[in-house]
Image (cartoon, rainbow, N blue to C red):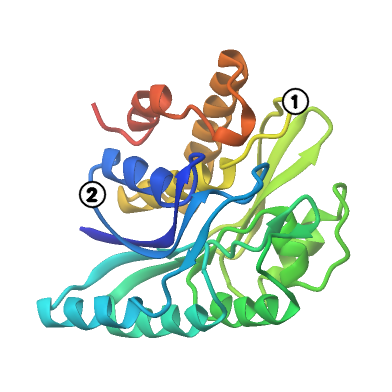
Amino acid sequence: MRILAINDISCVGKCSLTVALPIISAAGYTCDILPTAILSTHTGGFTGYTFRDLSEDIPSVLNHWKSLGLEYDIIISGYLGSVEQVEMVKEIKGAFLKRGGTMIVDPVLGDNGKLYAHFDENFVNEMKGLCRVADVIVPNLTEACFLTDTPYRPDAEFQSVLEKLNGLCPHASITGCEEGASSTVYYTDETGALRRYSTEKVQGQFHGAGDVYAGAFVGALANGLSLEDAVRVSADFTKQAIEQTAKDKTEARYGLNFESKLFGYLKALGKR
């Protein structure tokens, strides 16, 4: 099985491809990468970072790949460096996803009710179109609200947001839904039923949690887990990584200390 991760490279601050590549590889599969941008750090909690959009480089990369006859069982897209890249990802799905393969979109747009730097309403509208061609989408609550034109509230009616989201994609999971002492993922299973899975909430703000979840989710699906089990395993792994980061008292903007929790994740996948 071959997997393609389309995302940025943030050189410092564990997120995007520096998270997806080690987690998916540890899950036992080849993970090729297509960088959408290169940043000196991610944009959350850092100032003065450098940003280079790689839109001009992508067509040449894809032409070379076509000459190699590359095909992918799973493609996951994340942070896109320009609005033009939305159409590029759609074209990549058509040209490189195997028949019967799975297209996963992590519609990276923002967090805590706000869009990230470089994004605007036009980008949100284009991302809606990308979600419509996906098999599964994995937004956080902020992104789910933007995608469904729902006013953001930390205590939003999560099930209602998920129902609206299913108008874009039949299978979605919304992370970052806080309910009292729990952090909950609301998701749609293979039958179309609305479900939820909760873990104990760890106090604090932790950057890169969504990327850890998305990488673990891809690895779980690649290993044949159902959507229900993939959500459970990925949420548990992310929570354990957050707990480790809090225990280590690492500065949150540098990302989650997920590495020491990989063995437990692999055990949950049924690997020994």
Residue at 42%, 82% (x, y): give it: 88
Q: Position of residue 223 (x, y in %)?
A: 30, 47
- Residue on which disc 2 sits: 29
Find residue 174 and name its label. Answer: none
Instruction: Tell which of 199 and 128 is nearer to you.
Output: 128
CA gap, disc 2 to disc 1? 33 Å
Percent of width and height locating residue 155: 87, 47
Q: Secondary structure at mark 1?
A: loop
Residue drawn at the location 52% of the way across and 69% of the way down: 81
Side of 151 where 97 appears, left or right:
left
**Could you tell me the amino acid type at mark 2?**
Tyr
Q: Which quadrant would residue 45 be assigned to in this image?
A: top right
Q: Which quadrant, please, contains the C terminus?
A: top left
Residue projecting furthest to the front = 48
Residue 94 in view (yes/no)? yes
Residue at left offset 30%, top offset 33%? 270
Q: Which corner quadrant of the image does residue 102 belong to?
A: bottom left
Residue 224 position within the rendered picture, expressed as x and y whole percent measured from the top left: 32, 51
User: Where does label 1 land, which residue?
Assistant: 203
Instruction: Give the amino acid type for the residue marked by disc 1 in the picture.
Output: Gln
Residue pictured at 48% horizontal, 85% vertical: 87
At label 1, counting other C-alpha atoms closer than 10 Å, the crowd grade (few under 14, some 14-19, many 20 or more) is few
